[in-house]
Image (spheres, helix red, strand yellow):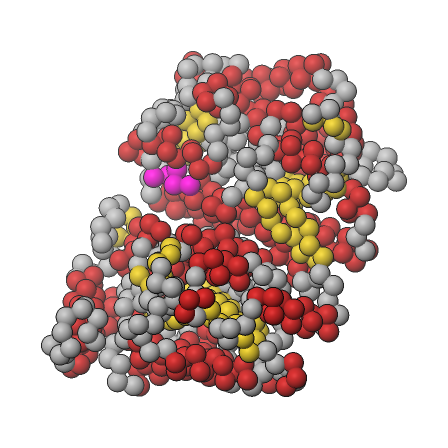
Amino acid sequence: MQTVDLNLQPLGSTTETPAELAALLVSPSLQASFSLHPPPDLQRLYQAWLARFLQHHHLLGRGAEAVVPDSVVDDWGQRLGTALRQWFNGQEWAPLHRALRRHPGAPLRLRIADALRPMEQWPWEELPLDRALWRLPPRDPALPTATLRQRRPRMLLLVVGQEDTLRLDREIQTLEALAQRGRLLLQTLRGPRSTLAQLRERLAEAPGWDALIFLGHSRADPGAGGSLQLGDGTWISGASLDASLRQAVDHGLQLVMLNSCSGVDLAHSCLAAGIAWVQCFREPVPTESAALAFTTLLRAMEAGKTFAAALEEASHALRRESWTGAHALLSAYGHPEARPFQLPEPRQRLQRRELLVLAAGTSAAGLSGIAAGWISRSNETIREWRMLTYLSPRDDRVIVSQASRMVAERLAQLTDGRFRIRIDPQPNLSSSEMFRRVSRGEAPCSYADVYYDKVLTPLFFAKAIPFGLTPREQTAWLHYRRHQGDAWPFHQSVYARVRVQNDSLEGLCSFPIACTGGQMGGWFKKELRSLEDLKGLRMRIPGLGAEVLNRFGVRTDLELIGRVIGPSEIEPRMRDGRLDAAEWIGPHDDEALGLHLLREQGFVHYYSPGWWEPATSTELMVNKEALAALPADHRAALETACADTYARILRTYDLRNMSALERLRRQGVQLRRFPPAMMAAFEEASKAHLDELARQNPATFGYVYAEWQTFRQRFRDTLAVTQYTPGALEV
C-alpha cells in the first residue's frame, strides 16, 4: 500500500510550540525536507477549546450542570480548526501538498517527535486531506510479528475495567452479537476476573489473540507508558504489560482498541511492543460518545471495512450525533509495517456447532482445549523453537536488535504460523554461554553478539574486523565455502575448535541475519588532529577496535568498568562526564539513543569512518541436530527467513541512515573524518594486532585469519576487473 509519510521534529528550543519545526516528507514519488513555523497561538487555542469541552461534558469533576453550552464549545472548536487549516494551507506546506496531489487517496501517516508531545494532542485528523490520516509512534518500534496470519475467525480478548461509574453494556452486547454470528471468538475478563495476573495469563496463551479490547478508565502517564484501571480496581501501567504484550504479538496480536480516556501513552506502549494498530481517544471523553464510536467501528468492520476505514466511519458518526467535539479526539495509531486488519468475510464464518462465546465464567483450560481442537481441525501442527538472546525489549529501538523478531515474523509468515520462534531474553548469560547451551542442545537457537565476549574472538570474522570487509564482501564471506561440496561455509569450521567451559561448539551451525553496513567513528568532545589527542581519552568501544585503540593510549570499556558498556548506558555516561568519546552504530541508531542531543555536554564532533567495524554482521546460531530434525519445508523456511532478514536489515540501515544524517546536519552536528595520517596509523596498528592474535592462537584465530586474507584478496582482484567504479576511467 502506498502512503505519504510526514515526520515532524523540533528545531532549536523544545517549548510547547517551538518557533520552527523540521519536516521530513517521504512519498512514493517525492522525498523532501522543509521547515514549518507553527502559529504561536495554536496551543493556546487547543487548551481553551479542550477546557470548555471537558467542562461541557462534566469531565472536570464539577457539578452536574453544564456551565458551558455546546455552542461555545463549537465556537472554540471552529477557531481552533480554522487556525490549524490556515497554517496547513500556507506556502510552507507546499512539498506535502504536491505529494498529496500526486498520490490521491494514499493515507497520510504522521509522526510527531517525543519533544513535541503537546502538538501530538492537536486534532490533525481535522485537516482537509480527502484521505485517511493515522499516526505513527514517535520512535521506530519493534517490528510486528502479528500481521502474518489471517486466522478465521478472529480471536478477541475483551478486558473490562472498573464499572462503578461507567455504562458498558452496549459495547459488550455488540461484541457478543458478533460472536454469536460467527464473526469472531470472544473471551471476556470482567469484574473480579479482570486482574493483572489473569490478563498476563491470557496474553501468554497460544494460539493467541488477534485483538485486545479494553473498556474502562485510563489516564495519561508518559513516564509509565500510560495506565489503566482493571475490573478489580487496581491501576496498572503500560510499561508493566510490555513483556506480556510482546509475547502476545509473537502469538498473533495485531489490534488494540482502547475505548477509554487519554490513551496516547498506552497507544505508544502498544506500538513499542510491535502491535500493528491501536485505536484511542487522546483526551477524556464522555462514556456514551466512546460507546457510539466503538459500536459504529465494529459494525463497519463487520460490513467488510478495514480497521482504518471503519475508524473514519466512527469519527463521522460522532460528528453527526450530539457529542460536541468528541470526533476531534479519536485517533488511529499504526505501526510503520502494519498491514490492513479486517474481520473475515461472512462466508468464512465457523459453523454454528463450532461457535465459541466465552463469558466471565469460562475457564482458561476450556478456551485452550476448544482452541486446540479448532487448530487440529485445520490440520495445523505447531512447532516452536526457543531463541536465547542477550537483548531486552527496550533494545528494539535499534534496528539490528530487531533481527530476531524479524526472523520470527518471516518464519511464521512462510509457514502460516506452523513454525514459530519464541524469543527468550537472557541478559545475564554471556554470548559464549548461550552458544555452549545451543551447541549442547539445551536450546535450539540463540542470537547474541560475539563482539561482547573475548572467549569468542575466533568468531569475530563473522562479525567485524578492523579495516576488514565491505558489506558486499562480508555478505559473500559469510557464504564462502573453501571446497566444493563443503557442508557449511568456511568460517563455521572453527566452531569445533573453540571451547567454552571445556565444551566444544561443534554442535553449532549458523545463518546470517543482519548487517549494519558501514558504521560511524563516534562522538567526541574535542577535535582530533593527531595521535597525541587520543592519549588518556575515555571512550566507549568494544571488541578489536578497542584493543587497537588501547595501543594509542585510549582507555576503553574493559579498563574503565571491567566489561562492555551496553547501549542503554552510553548516553547517561556521556551526559554525566564519565566518557570523552563513544561509538555506537551510525546516524539512525545513534539518534535513537539520543547521542545527538549531547551538544551541551561538548559532544559536537561526529567522526567517520568506523574503521573497526566496516561491515558488522550477526548470525542466528542453531543446534545442528535440531536443524536436521526439521522437515525439509521448515528448514527451507528458516533459511529463507534468515536470508530475507539479512537483506531487510541492510537496506533498512541504508535508507534510514540517509534520512537521519540529513536531520543531524540540519541540527548543526559537525561531521568530521579521521585525518589521513591517523587512519594510516590505525590501519598499521590493526594489522599488527591481528597478526599478533594469529600467532598467539594459530589453531583458532590464525586458522580463520589466513583463509580470510586469501578470500579478501581473491574477491578484490575479481571486483577490480568486473565492477564499475564511478569516476574511474580505466581498469
Question: Is residue 596 rendered magenta in the image?
Answer: yes
x and y percent of residue 346 in the render?
60, 85
486 left or right, relative to 713: right
Q: 1 above or below 354? A: above
x and y percent of residue 377 in the render?
73, 74
Q: Quadrant of the N terminus?
A: bottom right
Count of all numbered marks drawn on residues in the image: 0
Q: Residue placed at 77% from the left, 20% from the top?
A: 699
Q: Residue placed at 35% from the left, 45% from the top?
A: 666
Q: Quadrant of residue 691?
A: top right
Q: Quadrant of residue 133?
A: bottom left
Question: Is residue 338 rendered magenta in the image?
Answer: no
Is residue 307 or residue 706 the one in the foreground? 307
75 left or right, relative to 355: left
Q: Main secondary structure of the magenta part?
A: helix
Is residue 121 or residue 37 the one in the foreground? 121
- Residue 597 appears in view: yes
In this picture, which residue range is highlighted in magenta? 593-597
336 left or right, relative to 387: left
Residue at the far right in the pictured view: 485
Is residue 289 or residue 671 the one in the foreground? 289
- Residue 478 appears in view: no
Q: Residue placed at 42% from the left, 34% from the top?
A: 569
Q: Quadrant of the C terminus?
A: top right
Residue at the far left in the pictured view: 67
Is residue 38 or residue 66 the one in the foreground? 66
622 left or right, relative to 227: right
x and y percent of residue 214 in the render?
42, 68
